[in-house]
Image: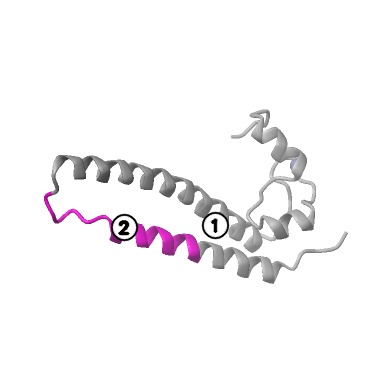
Amino acid sequence: MRKVNIKKIKEQLIAEREAIADKLRGKDLSVDESETPDPVDLAVRNYSKNVMLSVSENETRQLIMINEALDRIEDDEYGICQNCEKKINPKRLTALPSAMYCIECQALQEQGLLDED
Ligand SMILES: [Zn+2]
């Protein structure tokens, strides 16, 4: 089986992590609490804040996945499915560097059929 270019994957993961971190930082700056807005303004603001929070949650999860992938690179376990311990298809890893499961196990996980500890 063709091996993945770990160095390149690592660069890709670090770049992705930076991009998400930048986005999260930008969000913090956009929340301005110094003014006293009218009630409508406040409602709109709270709404967009909630939207922001849910986006942040999603991005935080992505950050965790990226960090875990980087850890696996350090531990020399990168590219191994975290469920069945088979090698993950290099094509899949190139498309999704933070993938932790092979395609079969990913499908099981999405259906909630995977035992996670
Ligand atoms: Zn698997």
| Residue 64, image x, y percentages | 51, 51
Q: Which residue is mark 1?
A: 67
Magenta stretch: helix, strand or loop mostly:
helix
Ligand 1 closer than 8 Å to label 2 CB: no
**Vertical order, 21 against 58 (above or below):** below
The span from disc 1 to disc 2 (Cα, nearest Å) is 22 Å
Most foreground residue, 23 or 82 = 23
Most foreground residue, 26 or 105 = 26
Question: Can residue 89 be seen?
Answer: yes
Residue at 48% x, 46% y: name it.
Answer: 58
As drawn, the label of residue 28 is 2
Q: Quadrant of ligand 1?
A: top right
Amino acid bearing label 1: Asn
**Vertical order, 85 against 12 (above or below):** above
Amino acid bearing label 2: Asp
Most foreground residue, 100 or 35 = 35
- Looking at the rendering, the stretch of residues picked out in magenta corresponds to 18-36
Residue at 48% x, 60% y: name it.
Answer: 20
Q: Is residue 91 left or right of residue 64?
A: right
Whether 23 is among the magenta residues is yes
Circle 1: element type = helix
Q: Which residue is most to the front?
A: 40
